[in-house]
Amino acid sequence: MTPIAIPERRQSARLENWSRAFYRFRQSWLSIIGLAIVIALIVIAIVAPWIVPHPEHVVGGTNTGAKFQPPSAAAWLGTNALGQDMFSLVLVGSQVSLFSGLAVVFIAIVVGTIVGAIAGYFGGWIDEILMRITDLLLTIPSLILAMAVAAALGTGVWNMIIAISITWWPAYARLVRGEVLVKKEEQFVVAAHALGADWPRILGKHILPNIVSPIVIKASLDMGFAILTVASLGFVGIGVKPPTPEWGTLLSGARSYMPDYWWTAVAPGVAIFLAVLAFNLLGDGLRDVLDPKARR
Amino acid sequence: MTLDIQNVTKNFPGPRQGFFGRGEGFTALDNVSLSIRKGVSFGLVGESGSGKTTLTRCILRLETLSAGNILFDGVDIHKLTPLEMRRLRSRLQIVFQDPYASLDPRMTIHDIVAEPLVIHGDVVNLNARQRTERVLELLLQVGLRSEHLFRYPHEFSGGQRQRIGIARALAVGPEFLILDEPTSALDVSVQADVLNLLHRLQEELNLTYFFISHDLGVIRYICDDVAVIYRGKLVEQGPVAEIFDHPKSDYTRMLLDAMPDPDPDRSPFRQKDAV
């Protein structure tokens, strides 16, 4: 028998799907704005330490001689009670917010997917036990739990992230369980059983790749709320310790100087607003692309 | 004997009622016995809900039995350990009815057809390169072309997808193939192509077919022996020619009468006085 030539791996089908998806995404200019702001935020968070006009203020340096300067050419967003440049603080503050938001969503996805997939796939009493634990955790308000964790373990970025994640993964577990229950009955999964595939293979190769879309949509919509929760914890004084700048902490510091020195509150407030809005717009756009059925 | 189904009964329990009670169950298979000789095409005919698919699921051990045994080459399938069962699956494969739902939409044709080779790596023992060559060989064997290798299922027609399903079933070189209504989701013209392909493959690879269908024409075309199932019970079984020409039971006779005749002159819709 003559050897058969193996053709080149053809990527155009996948490429075509992507370009079609991007075309649908572009149809909504709100999604594009969301994507643009999200990309800008990520870039700013990465390069912030090198572009801030006053790096010394970010690490705790003060300049009390220049306190409460209104926005001007020298200090674009004015200065706060310690004479620190608000623009520098807000820029660097994006690091903590974005990082914590990403970490919370990431941990929630990993834990939620594992628990949800196992519960949905195996069913029976495993499902009952895992889902009752999930329901139990869903009843705990994340802010209160975070305060309790902060009280028990002390404040800190990681304690805050863990505290929020504990109350966030159940939502993913419920989502993934539902999707797994549906996909489990699909015929290509039955086919994999008949081929002799074991459960890790069926879950990992057949079921999970087919439920990525709803997880991605939920994650992008959740990012905004995660950032908001992180800021809330900063506002009530849990989470990042000064002098590390964080939007919630900055806002809480500005609270007592309202409304005379409004810029100290407006700068971090607008940053939080923009971040939350951008991730929500992006999430809506992704949902339209990945899950056309849910379109309004 | 290759496959021996002995007095198989399958009950599905009814819905839970209260704490301990259960509603009335459903008997999908009632004392079904049949044996399939090596190298033949055995047809199973029955209407929707008569238990055809439940029987295939029982043979593949996707369902447990309520009673009875299923022997493959003298070995009781439902008594094997999971490892032995996995080994046996490489000799016993299935082609599904719906070619649209039975292929994973996120996998390329290469990965779909190569999957059984990976799962049964201890039996076939090929490296990645050899697997790709084997997949290509299979695709050509079922009438697809080499440029289809890295495409996704949604790029194919129903008939082509069914060929992919057949290639996947044949990948590890099984002896026994369950064909669960492999042509009922296809256009008539494509059905003929797929049936001819199955016929050719059976001769080339010396396969035993367990062919399930509700289409008597298809059964007559491809099968040597046939069994008729009605509401979970076997009505009769025997060689195709005998059953088709001299049906013993009323149900079989009714099925045969309901079969449309391809000859338009004998159509019941033909107007009597028209010439």
Image: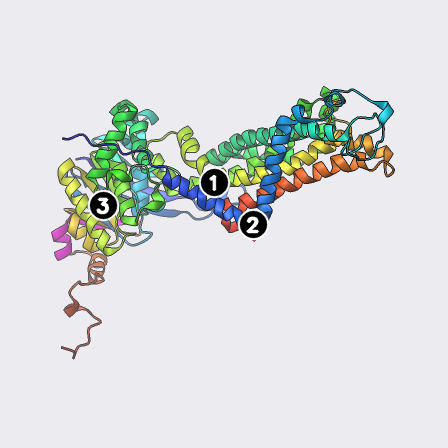
Q: Is residue B71 visible?
A: no
Q: Over which residues does the magenta segment extend? A: B233-246
Q: Is residue A103 visible?
A: yes
Q: Amino acid at mark 1?
A: Leu
Q: Is A190 placed above or below B261 here?
A: above
User: Residue A192 occupies which quadrant of the picture?
Assistant: top left
Q: Subunit of mark 2?
A: A
Q: Amino acid at mark 3?
A: Phe
Tell me whether marks 1 and 2 sit on the same chain: yes
Q: Residue A197: percent from the left, percent from the top?
A: 35, 31
Q: Circle 3 is placed at which residue position? A: B211
What colour scheme governs how the chains and residues are painted in the rendered image of this protein?
rainbow
- Total numbered labels: 3
Q: Amino acid at mark 2?
A: Ser
Instruction: Report the residue at 26% width, 23% height from top.
Output: B125
Q: CA distance from mark 2 to mark 3?
A: 51 Å
Q: Subunit of mark 3?
A: B
Q: Nearer the viewer, residue A185 or A66?
A: A66
Question: Tags 2 and 3 in contact by the CB under 8 Å rule?
Answer: no
Secondary element under disc 2, as helix, strand or loop, is loop
Q: Circle 1 is placed at which residue position? A: A181
Q: Nearer the viewer, residue B255 or A209?
A: A209
Q: CA distance from mark 1 to mark 2?
A: 32 Å
